[in-house]
Image (tube, helix red, strand yellow):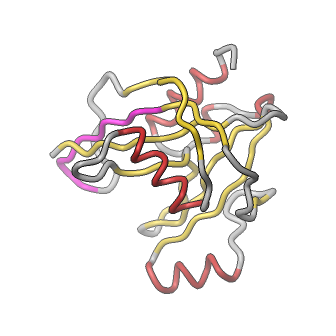
Amino acid sequence: MITVRVYGILINEQQQILVSDEYIRGQYITKFCGGGLEEGEGTKDCLKREFMEEMNLLVEVMDHFYTTDYYQPSAFKKGDQILSIYYHVKTLQKITTPLRELPFQFDEREMDMYNTTGQTETFRFINKVDFTADCMTLPIDKIVAEKIVNSVY
């Protein structure tokens, strides 16, 4: 089965890149914000929905940045393939979700979410000058991070 994932690259005015730190299925993962495409949904609508669900944040989906162009097996479902699509996004409102300074700095509310659902997430910005592929966990995100580092954005 092929699973389509859609992610947003948000670079703020201070040249910082937004990442999501997640604890899911017993693993700590740093990734770009976004998630799975649902049936009947377009990729841009998926990304808008994901930012609203995860951060209560309205975003505008800008230009396409990258689509996986090689076979990537799923890290979570043996036998599945992942197709990931990345867009640049910009905020349409002020970010009100708590942002962290350190990776995996979960607060009490986020830990309650973990105790209820078995997963949780928090968000932080990484200065572009400090941003490398090593900041990311998943193989596709590492490739995209390298492309960001080498881009003019």
Q: Nearer the viewer, residue 28 or 20?
A: 20
Q: Residue at x 60, y 61 (%)?
A: 56
The residue positioned farthest toward the front in the image shown: 92
Q: Nearer the viewer, residue 96 or 22?
A: 96
- Quadrant position of the C terminus in the picture: top right
Q: Is residue 13 above or below residue 93?
A: above
Q: Nearer the viewer, residue 58 or 153?
A: 58
Q: Is residue 10 above or below residue 52?
A: above
Q: Is residue 139 above or below residue 104?
A: above
Q: What's the magenta region? A: 77-86
Task: List x then y, in percent, for residue 26.
Answer: 46, 69
Label the magenta part by its dominant secondary structure.
strand
Task: List x then y, in percent, for residue 67.
Answer: 38, 26
Which quadrant of the figure has residue 91? top right
Task: List x then y, in percent, for residue 115.
Answer: 51, 85
Q: Residue at x 23, y 41 (%)?
A: 81
Q: Nearer the viewer, residue 140 or 46?
A: 46
Q: Residue at x 23, y 49 (%)?
A: 40
Q: Is residue 9 above or below residue 120?
A: above
Q: Is residue 86 left or right of residue 112?
A: left
Question: Is residue 101 in the magenta section?
Answer: no
Task: List x then y, in percent, for residue 69.
Answer: 32, 22
Q: How many marks?
A: 0
Question: Is residue 81 in the magenta section?
Answer: yes
Q: Residue at x 29, y 41 (%)?
A: 82
